[in-house]
Image (cartoon, helix red, strand yellow):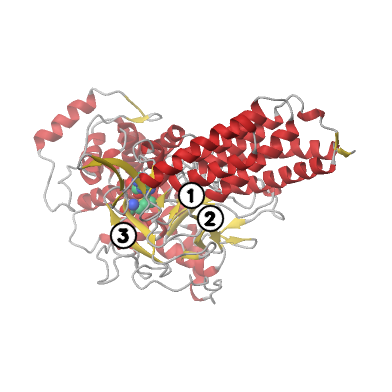
Amino acid sequence: MNTTQLINGKGRGCIMNGQSNLDSETESDNLESVKSEPYDIQTKYIFNQKFTNECDAFINYFQAIKNNGVMLNIMQEIENMGDYCDLFNDVNKDFYNSSLNAYSEPIPAEEQNESMLYASNLIRLIDTPEKGRCLVANTVIPKNKVLILEPPVVLQVKPLCTCVGDRESSLYRCHNCGIACKMFFTCEGCNVCIFCSRMCMLFAYENYHRYECYGVQRHFWSMEDTDYSYLSLRMMLYGASKKFKTNPIVGQPYGNAENNYPFISMLEYNFTELPRVKINEILYSSARNLLYLIMKTNFFNLYNDKKVDREEMYLYVGGLLVKHYCQAQINNIILKYPNLPASYGIDVISGTGKAICPTIALLNHSCSPNATLMVYYDSIAVKSVKTIKPGEEVTICYSEVDALMTLSERQTITEELFFFTCKCYFCEYERHWAEAPYKCLMCGIGKAKNVEVENKSVGYCTRCQKYFSLSSLADNLKVARICQNLYKATYAIEHVTRLAECYGQVFPPNSWNLLDVYKLLYEKHVLGEEKPLEAIKYGLLSFNILEHYVSRLYLPLLIAKVKFVVGVLNMRNFPKIKNVSEPEFDTMRIFVSEIIKMKEDLEFYLPEQRILFHQEIMIKVHEAFKAMQLN
Ligand SMILES: C[S@@+](CC[C@H](N)C(=O)[O-])C[C@H]1O[C@@H](n2cnc3c(N)ncnc32)[C@H](O)[C@@H]1O
């Protein structure tokens, strides 16, 4: 490799755009702004410019770093890795003709969707102005249906080499297909990547591992959950193995098992919306990957016989690496081992890798989702966890967001980790509930607001866009107010039940107003007095009433429930409960089973730290329960 040529060569612009975009004036302008910026190889290079697309950005960046120490530093780092040694090729060449050792085919999703690979025909794709593409239900989808069953196109497994962990109790993931295995083949080149079968090993070697093997051996890539350098390289290598063919097959824009690269290149990414520091990190990582490929692999020899200018090819690949980095960042799925006992320890919490599944990548996020992801052998399954109505969007919860967080906490996470402002039904509802607080009397699902039509106040549904009279809502609200007052005067529970019924007719099931019912009981029995068993009895009752109108997994209700349990545990007299009557003992038993149910609900939202917090609650309650004696 001629490094002098690499450093001195002048880029001619982006071949993807078909014309040069680097005239000498802008280039020298860029360099001026670059030279005045301090840089540090550790804190990454600060490139002080706004870009309109990732390819132009990479070209400008690459040209600029040729003229200062950044490029030399990266090249020095790569030089220091030692000579390129393609051990893998020599050692494993016998495998080429050996029998294959593949795992069985994954189970098909309910009924295959003709136009979307690996998806069931229970769902279809639509485009929305607010959230881009999304998947919606074609029909009523019951709980626990497999909606998508998709093997990852590319993945990154955290390398657990044979020397890490106790081999007897450890599970390993194949670095090609992601399947969890106990027995595996180790690449003798890097001695890090492991494969469940010879077929996977050969496939990986032929398609990408021959280029990454050396870097893996020398720990060239960080395996941090927040770093997508390695995954972006793998995505680019996948594209290269498909000769960068990005034209979708006619009639099959969303997926083609032979070559899913057209689909990968259509995945959402938000380069121009990223903060500048993030863009710099991505440009730096892509330049580093590119220089690695040039200096330590024969990747670009693939293009020797083509009439493509070498430098243009470098820039093209650099631009792709930037784009794939951004795509990996917002479309990756964290691979976790399902239901692993705590003894497995390693990586259970942080995940054991990341995968790109293009069909699953069409699912949008919701803070209260109706579907979830699970690893199923070498595939990722999307399963419904609630009944989904026809036309309703199928959503999953992108990690790190959980039910117990407030709207602003959730918003910070989706903005900082995923770079979008969440517009899921629940966040939108919380943001705008005061504007459209009622249940639509026409469709029964939509949110309705008060509007003036011909000087009369009527209801207008934001979903079905129909107008309706507000009179029955007003009647119900009147009765609700009477019930509230009656309860405050008598504390008779039937008034609360009637109140919940009226609210159920006026407000949609996710309305904060429904929590008024809970508050009434909570204020009287939990906050006011120091009688924990009374509090538990009425607390449980209020949840029963509410769950009748609201889903058990309704976010504010779940939050209220956790607060209720914590409130009870913190009551001064709670640890003092010892001798109880039989009905009181039953109440306590129901309380314990409620907490177990709640734990399952919380796990559904993936809040690892919250589960731990919850375990503490369970221990406390369990101890109190054990100490109780019947009178
Ligand atoms: C994995 S993709 C989902 C599919 C995407 N809508 C598409 O058209 O490709 C993630 C991107 O979808 C959008 N998105 C997903 N969930 C969203 C939500 N709850 N609110 C707003 N945008 C969302 C964001 O732009 C996000 O970066």
Mark 2 and mark 1: span between their CA atoms? 8 Å
Residue assigned mark 1 = 216
The kind of residue on which mark 1 rests is Val
Mark 2 and mark 3: span between their CA atoms? 39 Å
Q: Which of marks 2 and 1 is nearer the N terminus?
A: 2
Mark 1 and mark 3: span between their CA atoms? 40 Å
Q: Earlier in the sequence, mark 1 or mark 3?
A: 3
On the rendered structure, is 578 left or right of 222?
right
Mark number, residue 193 = 2
Q: Give the residue drawn at x 70%, y 50%.
A: 166
On the rendered structure, is 631 left or right of 47?
right
The kind of residue on which mark 2 rests is Cys
Say whether residue 125 is visible. yes
Disc 3: residue Cβ within 8 A of ligand 1's nearest atom = no
Q: Are marks 2 and 1 in contact (CB under 8 Å)?
A: yes
Q: Earlier in the sequence, mark 2 or mark 3?
A: 3
Could you tell me residue 83's position as x and y percent?
43, 48
Q: Element type at marker 3?
A: strand
Would you place residue 139 above or below residue 572 in this image?
below
Mark number, residue 253 = none
Q: Element type at marker 1?
A: helix
Residue assigned mark 3 = 126
**Quadrant that contains the C terminus:** top right
For mark 2, does the 10 Å Cα neighbourhood hold few (<14), some (14 to 19), or many (20 or more) residues?
Answer: many
Q: Element type at marker 2?
A: loop
Closest to the observer: 470 or 181? 470
Could you tell me residue 197's position as x and y percent?
56, 67
Q: Are marks 2 and 3 in contact (CB under 8 Å)?
A: no
Would you place residue 141 above or below residue 25 in this image?
below
For mark 3, does the 10 Å Cα neighbourhood hold few (<14), some (14 to 19), or many (20 or more) residues?
Answer: few
